[in-house]
Image (cartoon, helix red, strand yellow):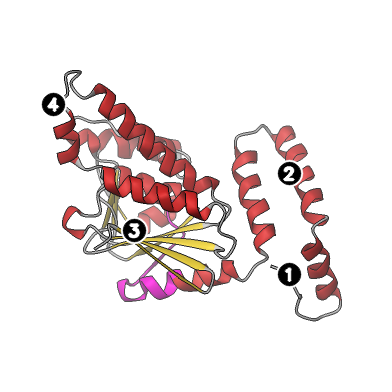
Amino acid sequence: MKILERHDENAVCHLHMNAPERLNALSEEMLEALQTQIESLQTDTSVRVVVISGAGKAFCAGHDLKQMTAGRQAEDGGKAYFKDLFDRCTSVMTGLQRLPQPVIAQVHGIATAAGCQLVASCDMAVAAEGTRFGVNGVNIGLFCSTPMVALSRNIPRKKAFEMLVTGQFIDAHRAEALGLVNTVVPADDLAPATQELAQLVASKLGAAVKIGKQAFYEQAQMGLDDAYAHTGQVMVENMLHRDTEEGIAAFLEKRPPEWSQ
């Protein structure tokens, strides 16, 4: 049994975290498996969208606390182990945003600590009713500092700080209102609703989506003038693409576009 299962269908790659007995914790093994797939997807032109989901009763409960406790047994008290662990987790989270394909989290049960970070690091998220989200490390004396990076870039700053400093959970509808997830659906509709969104995105011109996703995150870190200057150049690049020319011509001629990819 693989800890991370993958199957591709209709240009959508489904990554299914498969460690339900550990609530799909981001263990060393899970992080390694996710990193391997991220590296593979970087150059996989057959995939236009990625969906991440979890087996069992939870999406992801964050880091594996048993492994972290074992890491303390090193002579340095675990310092080197913890740095390597958090570095590898960061590589996965940033790697998702650097993928050319949009990534959708398909969330149910709970998404806590680094699991909530995983949701926030995906480009979009669909959640089942009843899902709970939290950055609750403070409850055990470990402030969720790395999850904070992704969370504070998804929801209003004061609400993010409240979640981090109280350890309290929010429900799926509150997560939607704050912008952590795109939509909330009945649990039975979670997979179909996620697939519907994935197929809608996959139907768009892949080259344009790739260009747009990269520019989206780049401009978000810039000031207003720099952002417009940068995205103006991106629009020029996009306009010169052969398939963009075809898409515009097809629209004007009221016919379906014949894209090369």
Q: Which residue is mark 1?
A: 260
Q: Secondary structure at mark 2?
A: helix
Q: Nearer the viewer, residue 131 or 207?
A: 207
Where residue 233 appears, as percent x and y from the top left, is: 79, 43
Residue ID at (38%, 72%): 191
Q: Nearer the viewer, residue 69 or 252?
A: 69
Counting other residues with Cα less than 10 Å from the Cα at mark 1, is it few (<14), some (14-19), or many (20 or more)? few
Q: Which residue is mark 3?
A: 172
Q: Quadrant of the C terminus?
A: bottom right
At label 1, the amino acid type is Ser
Residue ID at (49%, 73%): 196
Q: Which residue is mark 2?
A: 231
At label 4, the amino acid type is Gln
Dot in front, 3 or 2: 2
Dot in front, 4 or 2: 4
Residue ID at (65%, 40%): 219
Range of the magenta residues? Answer: 180-194
